[in-house]
Image: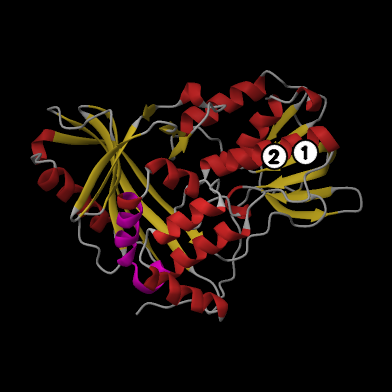
Amino acid sequence: MNSPALPPTSAYDYLLVGGGAAGLSLAYHLTHEPRLADKRVLLIEPAAKDQNDRTWSFWADEPGLFDEIATHEWRAIAFRSPGFERTFTLEKYTYRTLRGLDFYQFVHRALGVRPAQFTLVRDEVVDLVNTATGVEARTATGQVFTARYAFDSRPPAIEPQSAMHRYLLQHFVGWEVETTCDVFNPQVMEFMDFRGAQHHEARFIYVLPYSPRRALVEYTLFSATPLAKATYEFHITEYLQHTLGLSASQYQVVAEEVGAIPMTDHPLPARAGAHIINLGTRAGRAKPSTGYAFQRIQAQSARLVKALATTGQPPTDPTGDKWQFHLFDTLLLDIMQRRGEQTRDIFTQLFQRNPVERIFQFLDEKTTWADNLRIMNSVSAGPFLRSIGQVLRKRASQRE
C-alpha cells in the first residue's frame, strides 16, 4: 500500500479512520468486492502495526476470510464452576484464535497489491466533519482530506451517565506459558473456569492450549475498575501451580497480554451524520455482555460492503442490531454491576441447561424468539426481574 507525499487536499471515495481490527477488516472486505474495485480508499492510522499487541478469539459456524491465518482452532470447549463441569463437543461451530500481528500483516499485504486503490497515511485524524457532499478530515500534521464517506473506528469519547447506564470493563492479564511436561489438552479450550473465588465480581480463568506444553492462560474479570497487575499474576500463578500442579521451575512465561474492553449499554450510535459511519468499539461492536467483538466487526464490514456495492451508499442501519438482544445485554450488565458474583450462577445455569450450540447462537444474536424464551427460562428469574424494574425506571443498579 502506497504512502506518497500528498497535496494539502486530496479527494477519495472512502476514508478509513483507524487501522486496527475494524478499519482493516472493512478494507479487506472491500478487496473482495469487484464492484468497488474502482473506488479510491484512504486509510489514516497513526501507528505502525508491527507488534503482536493482542489476540482475537471467536466462534464461527461457517468459513471466514481470515481462517488461513488462524493460530489454532478447537472443536471442544470446557466450562467449569463449583458443582458443575462439562466438556462440550462442538458440532456446528469451531472456536478460533488469531494473533493481531498476523492479521495486520495479512491485510496490509492484500492492500499492498492494490496501490491504485488503497493509500496509507501515517497520521492522526483530529477533526472529522460532515460536509454537503461528503466528509472533511483534518490531521495532527495539518493535512486535509475529503471523501464521499468516512468510516471511523477511533475509540469513542463517552461522558458517563451512571444513573441511567452501566459502565464496566472486561479486563485481563494473560501469560503465554511453556511447560517442561505435558499438561494441556490442545483439543479442548477452557472457555470459562469459575472455580476460583469471585470476590463479589465475575472472575474466571480462560485457557487457549496450543500444544501439550504451550498455552495462553488468562485471568479475566467483569468489573468497574482494573486490578493491580500483581493481583492478576497471583491468580494465574495459583492456577498453574495449584490447579495444574506445576512447580515454578516447570513453566516459563514467553509472552504476555494485558487488556481492558469497555462493556456498557451507553448509546453508541452507528452513524455520526449523513456521511460518517462508526466502526468497531465506536459503533458498539464489542458485545456489552461478553466483550467479544471480532465476528461482530466482520458482520458489519460485510453489511457495509454489500450496501455500497449494491446501492452506492451505506445502509440506513449500518449494524442490523436487534433491540431485544440489546435488552438482554443491559440486563446482564445490570446484574454484574449490582452483584457481579451472581454472574457465575447465571453462566452455570446456561451451560447446564442448554445445548452449547444454542448458547453460541444466542450470543451471536441469531436465535429465534422461541430459543430466546428457552434461554431465559433456563436461568433463575429473580436477578433479571429486579434488573427489568431498573430498566423500566431508566435507572442503573449500583453495587449492593
Q: Residues within 10 Å of mark 2 (few under 14, many from 20)?
A: some
Residue drawn 56% across and 54% down? 369
Position in image of residue 47 (x %, y %)? 57, 40
For the C terminus, give its image quadrant. Answer: bottom left
Q: Main secondary structure of the magenta part?
A: helix
Disc 2 designates what residue? 303
Residue drawn 37% across and 48% down? 354
Range of magenta residues: 335-351
For the N terminus, give its image quadrant. Answer: top right
Report the number of numbered marks. 2
Check if residue 344 falls in the magenta segment.
Answer: yes
Locate residue 27: give its quadrant: top right
Locate residue 104: give its quadrant: top right
Disc 1 designates what residue? 307
Left or right relative to 31: residue 162:
left
Q: Residues within 10 Å of mark 1 (few under 14, many from 20)?
A: some
Q: Mark 2 and 1 residues: CB-CB less than 8 Å, in contact?
A: yes
Under tag 2, what secondary structure?
helix
Left or right relative to 347: residue 23:
right
Q: Amino acid at mark 2?
A: Arg
Residue drawn 28% across and 33% down? 188
Position in image of residue 394 (x %, y %)? 57, 78
Left or right relative to 211: residue 47:
right
